[in-house]
Amino acid sequence: MNFVSSPILDDFDVLTHAFLTRKGIGEEGPLSSLDFREKDGYEKVEAKRRKVVLGKLFGFDHARLVIARQVHGDGVLVIDESIDRNRDILSQLSGAKGDAIVTTLDGIALGVLTADCLPVIFFDPLVRAAAVVHAGWQGTSKCVTGKTIEVLKNRFGSNPEDVIAAMGPAIGPCCYEIKDDVANRFANMDGAILADNGIKLLDLKRANLLQMLEYGIKEEHISISDICTSCKTDLFFSFRKEGEAAGRQLSFILMKER
């Protein structure tokens, strides 16, 4: 299995989206893994994966994929008409920081890289706006998901009640033991912190669900993957389970050109 998708987004023919797994499309060589991390020594391999994997599996040019420099914060990068679409988009955004990306432009794939952190995809079918979010515990504690909804609303006129949201595979509370300093940041989120024999566990998906509801997303417009990446390291990278050796899997959304 190379990727999973959200059933709530699968209904929209105008979209291409996916939460990729770690499984490659070849038995050996650089395509035997879908590790998309951007790290010294991986540039050439990762570039080949982008080119071949995105073209073969999803049918679009890898140069259309935009991934910001993720810093575990709450910054939202907006890609709007100020982008020169006749020039390489990646070079124009080189080094741009952000743990969320929003656009209303067709033909641009917005991506985030994760290895236990939560990937979130938003789509407003009425305004025709898309967003991706990288939400680890730090970004979640800073309400990066809620701030992305605010950008959709204030910048592009989205009504949160119209927005569709999909949470992809991420570490589950079964595996996410945390210390008091982290738990205290989620003390006011009902059900986000679980206790097991004195051990505190974070439910990252629950925390983001509560933020979405607070910012106006309808619960029936939200899909939540039940996959724990730390439990399923045969299919997904997990920093909690694998440490620095963990790769990064890609999640993305692209609104097809009209």
Image: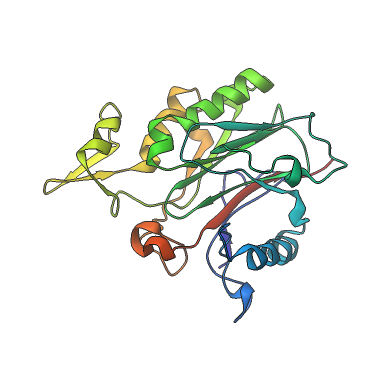
Residue name at image x 58 percent, y 57 percent? 38
Residue sitting farthest toward the front: 40
Total marks shown come to 0
Seen at 76% across and 53% down, the residue is 63
The residue lying at 42 percent from left, 29 percent from top is 211
Compared to residue 1, the image places residue 165 above or below, namely: above
Which residue is at the far bottom?
28
Q: Is residue 227 visible?
A: yes
Please provide percent x and percent y for residue 210.
Answer: 39, 30
Q: Position of residue 241 (x, y in %)?
A: 34, 62
* Residue 208 drawn at (x, y percent): 42, 35
Q: Which residue shows up at 77% across the image and 59% down it?
A: 59
Would you place residue 115 above or below residue 122 in this image? below
Direction from residue 70 to residue 188 in the image, left or right:
left
Q: Which residue is nearer to you in this view: 44 or 209? A: 44
Give the answer, above or below, for where 203 lies relative to 46: above
| Position of the C terminus by quadrant | top right
Please indicate whether residue 207 sits to the left or right of residue 220 in the image: left
Residue 9 lies, with reference to residue 219, above or below; the image says below
Q: Give how far across and how far down residue 65 sits, in percent.
A: 70, 49
Render colour scheme:
rainbow
Q: Nearer the viewer, residue 220 or 191?
A: 191
What quarter of the picture does the N terminus occupy? bottom right
Residue 254 shown left or right of residue 22 in the figure:
right
Tell me, yes or no, if residue 10 can be seen here. no
- Identify the residue at the far left of this view: 197
**Viewed as shown, does residue 106 lie left or right of 74?**
right
